[in-house]
Amino acid sequence: FVDKYLQDQHWVITAGPTREAIDPVRYISNHSSGKMGYAIAHAALRAGAQVTLISGPVNIPAPAGCELIQVTSAEQMHQQALTYVPKATTFVACAAVADYRVANIADEKIKKDNERMQISLIKNHDIVADVANLANKPFIVGFAAETQNVEHYARGKLMRKNLDLIAANDVAKAGQGFNSDDNALTLYSAIDKIEIPLANKQIVAKQLVSLINQHYLAKNTE
Ligand code: PMT
């Protein structure tokens, strides 16, 4: 029987990709399947937390017992995150959010009349950074998906986005990261570095949830 050690906590978790429309039939997106974020939601639920899962479009079922908020674009995810976070003890940003959106979404399907075309992009809000700027902020865990200099970039994001923890994955390695069933993470705080070795995302998520809680308790009993 699973220990309900998160009984008094409410976790808000983002998962999956976002889609940025170009015209009514096309979009810009990425390879996130939602598996990592959904596994974290599942593990947090099993440990007794109340879970709100804010998800981009994915093809996997949400874990039973979570509150599922479905979104498509980064700006929708941003809006829903800021709506639900005030109730949260913990925010985990596992979604692969598009950094940019299309400046002018075409009303009609774009025709292939030209040899070249350009799409102008504008920056999206940074969801996890905006959550970290709230006066009454929860405990905040970001992710870093990197293809090189993993520790350097992850620590940079931890500091710049003002996070409590960041879980870094090397998404250049085969058999882990985007869309795979397995993952390996390195969890950084300002002082700690903890390795979660390559395993099925359900197993990785279970360890991650427990480590997040240990750091949450340490911070909140300071
Ligand atoms: O979904 P899967 O197929 O299981 O794959 C899992 C995963 C590889 C997507 C996941 O483990 C992961 O790394 N998620 C974060 C992906 C990402 O966008 O990383 P990033 O380094 O670009 O972003 C850094 C952090 O800022 C992330 O917490 C991200 O959610 C957040 N962010 C980024 C941009 C933005 N506009 N708003 C954000 O909140």
Image (cartoon, grey):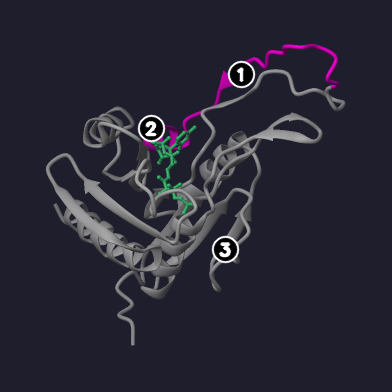
Query: Which residue is under mark 1?
Result: 121
Q: Nearer the viewer, mark 1 or mark 3?
A: 1
Q: Of marks 2 and 1, which one's residue comes earlier in the chain?
A: 1
Between 206 and 6, the residue placed more toward the observer is 206
Q: Where 185 sits versus 133, above or below?
A: below
The Cα–Cα distance between marks 2 and 3, rounded to whole angstroms, is 24 Å
Q: Of marks 2 and 3, which one's residue comes earlier in the chain?
A: 3
Name the spot of residue 132 as percent of width and height, x first.
37, 36
**Secondary structure found at label 2:** loop
- Which residues are drawn in magenta? 111-134
Q: Dot 1, how many residues are within 10 Å of its Cα: few (below 14), some (14-19), or many (20+)?
A: some
Question: Seen in the image, is 222 located left or right of residue 154?
Answer: left
Query: Which residue is under mark 3?
Result: 67
Question: Seen in the image, is 135 located left or right of residue 185?
Answer: right
Image point (27%, 57%), residue name: 212
Q: Dot 2, how many residues are within 10 Å of its Cα: few (below 14), some (14-19), or many (20+)?
A: few
Q: Which mark is residue 133?
A: 2
Identified by mark 2, the residue type is Asn
Identified by mark 3, the residue type is Glu
**Secondary structure found at label 3:** strand
Say how many tags the image has: 3
Q: Cβ of disc 3 within 8 Å of ligand 1?
A: no
